[in-house]
Amino acid sequence: MERATRRRLYAAWFSAAWVLEGRAIQDVFAVPGLFYGTSLRFYDPNIDAWQVFWIDPLKSVFFRMIGRAQGNEIVNEGKETPELARAYGLVGQSSATVRWIFADITPNSFHWRSERSSDGTHWSIQREYFAHRVVRGQDSQMGKVVRSSTHS
């Protein structure tokens, strides 16, 4: 049986920059009314991948992922925490895997989606965002407006 999909559109903003003297990248991603979060990521040569830490203080969520390039995409993957499941409107403990994928990356846009799987084979999209750069004055690093939708 196919599940009905509900989509809601949100306005959002995103910014990213190198921090800690160029040792890490921090992004701030906010969808007012849905979440306010930041991730800190750094390259770990011991595993040849990026360690990614996501924090949403509004919903008390902390989530750790491992990020790697896969073809033309960047895939961050980790075990779903109870706090993340709750933030997505899911109840109970979870052993699901979640991956956050950056795709169609250009200097001025990207497509981001959150996928979830209980078995590692069948994935469902939970949220997706289509980001486009908006230049405001001299600061082209800030002010990205995002068209997004949630799936449920």
Image (cartoon, grey):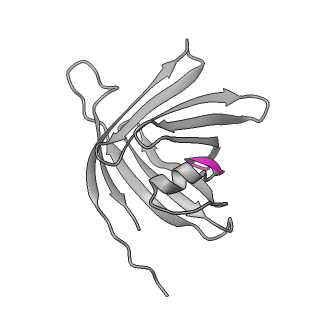
Residue toward you, 57 or 133: 57
From the image, give the main secondary structure of the stretch colored magenta.
Answer: strand
Q: Is residue 22 above or below residue 11?
A: above
Location of residue 134 by image quarter: top left
Question: Where's residue 15, x and y in %?
Answer: 38, 31
On the question of residue 100 being in view, the answer is no
Q: Is residue 150 left or right of residue 96?
A: left
Q: Residue at x 77, y 35 (%)?
A: 47
On the question of residue 127 being in view, the answer is yes
Question: Where's residue 60, x and y in %?
Answer: 48, 41
Location of residue 17 by image quarter: top left
Question: Where's residue 135, x and y in %?
Answer: 24, 29
Q: Residue at x 53, y 56 (%)?
A: 85
Q: Is residue 127 above or below residue 102?
A: below
Residues shaded magenta:
70-78
Residue toward you, 118 or 51: 118
Question: Where's residue 127, x and y in %?
Answer: 42, 57
